Amino acid sequence: MSTPPPSPPAQDFIRYDLLTQKALRGVVHDVLVRVSREGAPGDHHFYISFRTTDPDVKVSSRLRQKYPAEMTIVLQHQFWDLEVRDDGFEVGLSFQNIPEKLVVPFASITGFFDPSVQFGLKFDNPDAEAGAEEAETSATIEPLNAPEPAAAAENADDSDKPAPPEGGAEVVSLDKFRKK
């Protein structure tokens, strides 16, 4: 007696993938609200990666030219005017001693990492939020390893990138946080 072939997976009309993305982006929202009110507690600080190509992302043309696809910012000691809304946040940072105001929708965030507790969220496939029917979307909670400072310096190409100013914002490559 042969076993019948498995049934094709049922179509997900509820879109659990999008609901999960929304819930995990809510974690980022809630963390930033707390930080905007109380400051970052303890040693908590955050690496936030986002797509600079999204229409509602607001960064200077200078930063958009330098980071045409994706940018990672660090919220640690030197940031100001953090305002969090339901759909995104804005923050003041300094890049090469030039103050900048960034506006980042939560839907544009591709990664959130707090190295003080090794907590990370990675958001994949932005097309799913635009309604792509067959896109597989995943938001994962992963233990991520922060880069070793020496290893990060050895792997950096400093030929055309000036060092970040003391106490200023630091833009880092997301590759430093990917599992090897």
Image (cartoon, grey):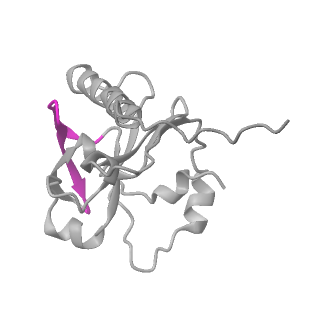
User: Which quadrant is the N terminus positioned in?
Assistant: top right
In terms of depth relative to the viewer, which is nearer, 3 or 166?
3
Residues shaded magenta: 78-96
At which x and y percent is residue 174? 46, 56
Q: Position of residue 60 (x, y in %)?
A: 14, 63
Q: Is residue 36 left or right of residue 27?
A: left
Q: Is residue 117 above or below residue 157?
A: above
Residue that lies at the very extreme toward the right in this rendered image: 1
Q: Is residue 83 magenta?
A: yes
Give the image quarter of residue 106: top left
Residue 165: % across, % down: 32, 58
* Residue 55 figure quarter: bottom left
Which residue: 18% across, 42% down? 91
Residue drawn at (28%, 69%) of the image: 68
Q: Main secondary structure of the magenta part?
A: strand
Asked if residue 73 shows in the view, the reply is no
- Residue 154 can be seen in this image: yes
Q: Is residue 76 above or below residue 158?
A: above
Q: Residue 17 placed where, x, y %?
A: 41, 36
Q: Quadrant of the C terminus?
A: bottom right
Please identify the residue farthest to the front as the structure is shown: 1
Residue closest to the eye, 138 or 75: 138
Q: Is residue 89 above or below residue 169?
A: above
Was residue 16 drawn as part of the magenta stretch in this picture?
no
| Residue extending farthest bottom | 159
The number of discs equals 0
Foreground of the two, 144 or 8:
8
In which quadrant of the rendered view does residue 30 lie? Answer: top left
